[in-house]
Image (spheres, helix red, strand yellow):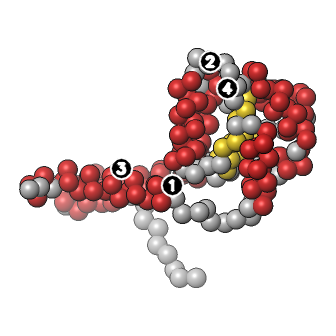
Amino acid sequence: MEPSEVLEFDLAGYETLLRQDSKVALKCKHIFEDIYKKNATANEIFFTQDNVKYLGLVAHNEMKESLVEFVKSNLDKINKFPLVATGTTGKLLYKEAQVILSKKVKSGPLGGDQAIGQMISTDNIIGIIFFRDPLSAHPHHADIEALGRLCDVYQVPLATNPTTATAVLDYLVANENMETSPVNSLMEDYGRQQAQVVKDKSNPSQKP
């Protein structure tokens, strides 16, 4: 192991150095501020970042029993994944199907759909089974549409009825040990477009 040195730089030492050489003192101050910021960021990521990928379970009121029955019929496969569910759906799944959730968010109309959408954007959702009622209006329709859009953007499998849920669940089980995700050309294209926007804004004089 290579020898290391520890530098203790307290307030008294800084004040002494400041009197002796203000330029060196300020340079040391900036160095220690940078170290503090880097450590603070690293600690924040270490203690708050969730690296788990969840299977989302959501259902409208009229479809909750259908989701419960689906989960009961596919319990062995469902239990292979950490689970997240919206409010009432999660309670019913626990009560009627003995499903243990790893995470529960608010009910859909209270922001639950948005919470799961946030998890999609942080790469914490592996797939969503969302039994939607296509024959009723919903006050949080915009949230439902936004959730579906995010699934398309981030290429998250989304099932909205028992037939598609069976297909999605089989796909997830077959690929549960897959270490790399398929290439998301949509996100790559968007990244290039945004980089070009920043470049154009930074160099307005280069425009014709």
Residue occupying image coordinates x 78% and y 42%? 163
Residue identifier under label 4: 134
Q: Secondary structure at mark 3?
A: helix
Residue identifier under label 2: 137
Between 137 and 54, the one lying in front of the other is: 137
Query: x and y percent of residue 81 in the render?
Result: 78, 50
Q: Secondary structure at mark 2?
A: loop
Name the quadrant containing residue 86.
top right
Vertical relation: 3 (above or below) 80: below
Looking at the image, residue 191 sits to the left or right of residue 3; the answer is left
Query: x and y percent of residue 119 in the render?
Result: 59, 42
- Dot 3 crowding, Cα within 10 Å, few <14, some 14–19, many 20+: few
Which one is earlier in the sequence, the residue at label 1 or at label 4?
1
Residue occupying image coordinates x 66% and y 43%? 158
The three-letter amino acid code for the residue at tag 2 is: Ala
Find the distance from the CA under tag 3 to the CA under tag 4.
66 Å
Query: x and y percent of residue 128 in the render?
Result: 69, 42
The three-letter amino acid code for the residue at tag 3 is: Leu
Find the distance from the CA under tag 1 to the CA under tag 4.
45 Å
Which one is earlier in the sequence, the residue at label 1 or at label 3?
3
Residue identifier under label 3: 11
Which one is earlier in the sequence, the residue at label 1 or at label 2?
1
Label 2 near label 3: C-beta < 8 Å? no
Quarter of the picture containing the C terminus is: bottom left
Which one is earlier in the sequence, the residue at label 3 or at label 4?
3
Find the distance from the CA under tag 1 to the CA under tag 3.
25 Å
The three-letter amino acid code for the residue at tag 4 is: Pro
Label 2 near label 4: C-beta < 8 Å? no
